[in-house]
Image (tube, rainbow, N blue to C red):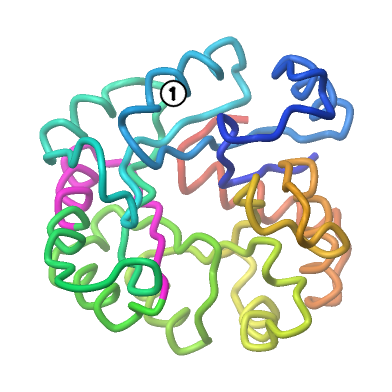
Amino acid sequence: MLIDSHCHLDKLDLTPYQNDFSCFMQEADKQHIEHMLCISIDLEAYPSMCELVQPYDNISLSVGVHPNVDTGQDPTAAELIALADNNRVVAIGETGLDYFRSEGDLTWQHQRFVHHIEAAKVTKKPLIIHTREASVDTLRILKEQGADEVGGVIHCFTEDWNFAKQAMDLNFYISFSGIVTFKNAKSIQEVAKKVPADRYLIETDSPYLAPVPFRGKPNYPLYVQQVAQFVADLRAVSTELVAQQSNANFRRLFSVAA
């Protein structure tokens, strides 16, 4: 049994499942996907995302606006706090900084990030952090804003061991996506070998970033199995142990009962 700690279920290509989300969920059950965390990236799609997953007790939710979203509603901390008042919502985000896709004066990104941290501290719910080509500022803002009070996860980890150590010192977990299976991901693979057994998660970030051997194709939470197997090989342990450890870490971080 595996947990996909980060996926965008409302964005999946359901063509192989008769364009029916319930068919996909049946297959996920057959493939022993125990739980999924469906991640919010904007508030406009949030109501329909909640409606999609509402019938399924093994799907949790986050609430937040992705750092690259530059249209639609930019939430205040108060708005995020209100939306997080839902027992299905276990995290705030994804949030953070992205200097790869966004250019120019990114003060708005920093302000949005701070609002999410404020909301997390009030709601006592962990943060889901996206960071790309912004490692220094991401760590600085997390420190300045006291994000270690709630902690969270650096999702889809793409940094090095030095960053991982600093993030863990701030009470954050490290989550590995399909990127860890890529041939050129040597530094990420080194982190996957070194990270303590009680501080890592696995994810797909589906429908994006499918792992080898599905790279370049639509991604699905079912492929968390490939991530688990690859991480197990790196750590020279069984896939079953990676499942046990990552599942326990997920449930502890997000306070999701088994």
- Locate residue 23: give its quadrant: top right
* Viewer-side residue, 123 vs 23: 23
Please state, as top left, top right, bottom left or bottom right, where the C terminus lies in the image: top right
The image shows residue 56 at horizontal and vertical percentages of: 62, 16
Which residue is found at the position 15% from the left and 57% from the top?
114
The image shows residue 57 at horizontal and vertical percentages of: 59, 18
Q: Residues within 10 Å of mark 1 (few under 14, many from 20)?
A: some
How many labels sit on residues?
Answer: 1
Which residue is found at the position 31% from the left and 44% from the top?
65
Please state, as top left, top right, bottom left or bottom right, where the N terminus lies in the image: top right
Q: Give the structural element (helix, strand or loop) at label 1.
A: loop
The image shows residue 132 at horizontal and vertical percentages of: 42, 72
- Residue 205 lies in magenta, yes or no? no
Side of 118 where 124 appears, left or right: right
Side of 69 where 12 appears, left or right: right
Three-letter amino acid code at disc 1?
Arg
* Viewer-side residue, 105 vs 193: 105
The image shows residue 112 at horizontal and vertical percentages of: 18, 53
Bounds of the magenta segment: 114-132
Side of 257 where 194 appears, left or right: right
